[in-house]
Amino acid sequence: MKGIQVSRFGGSEVLEYKELPDPVPDLDQVLIQVRGASVNFADTRARSGAYHLGKKPPFIPGLDIAGVVIEVGTDVTQIKEGDHVIAFPASGSYAEKAVARQELTFVIPKTLSFIKASAAALVAGTVTHMLRHLARIEEHESLLVHAAAGGVGTTALQVAKAFGI
């Protein structure tokens, strides 16, 4: 498969488009044909070596994807081949295929665009968790977003509006 690999830390010049081995799912993982992958601030930090969860080179960057399940591990019970999903892959997302644990893979409607789904997976989940579970914000309360310029900030405004805040 084709994919992007980081062989050394640095700027965008360290992103190498190359032939990579196909990932193989473990018993609790699914193999996904990637149809959309987001680019997050954390990806640029990982590429530069400055992200707290960053991997050591060589690695495939990327935190979230949308795509079609093409194979499931024998312990997978909630996802099936052919499902359209968003996922947080163990193998990185800047490639034609990726593996993700069943618990980090979520079925989406087949009518939802892969591009829109992949762009929203990480930021929408982060914002929803922050507003509902950490801030415990409720309808008609006020919300101050200091930086509504990036993915999380702009999504916070949209999610808050949807929540009636």
Image: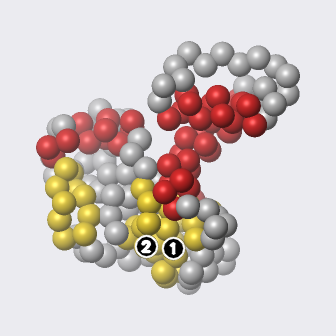
In this rendering, position of residue 12 left or right of residue 140: left
Left or right of 144, for residue 121: left
Image quadrant containing the C terminus:
top right
Q: Give the residue number, with chain letter if any, for mark 2.
A: 33
What label does residue 30 carry, if any? none
Which badge, 2 or 1, comes first in the chain's sequence? 2
Q: Is residue 65 visible?
A: no
Label 1: element kind: strand
Q: Residue at x 64, y 28 (%)?
A: 157
Q: Quadrant of residue 143?
A: top right
What amino acid is labelled 1 in the image?
Answer: Val
For the residues labelled 2 and 1, say whether their Cβ atoms are less than 8 Å apart: yes
Residue 113 locus on image (x, y percent): 55, 61
Instruction: Tell me which residue sits at (60%, 76%) in the image.
Output: 83
Q: Label 1: few (<14), some or many (≥20) within 10 Å?
A: many
Q: Nearer the viewer, residue 56 or 151?
A: 151
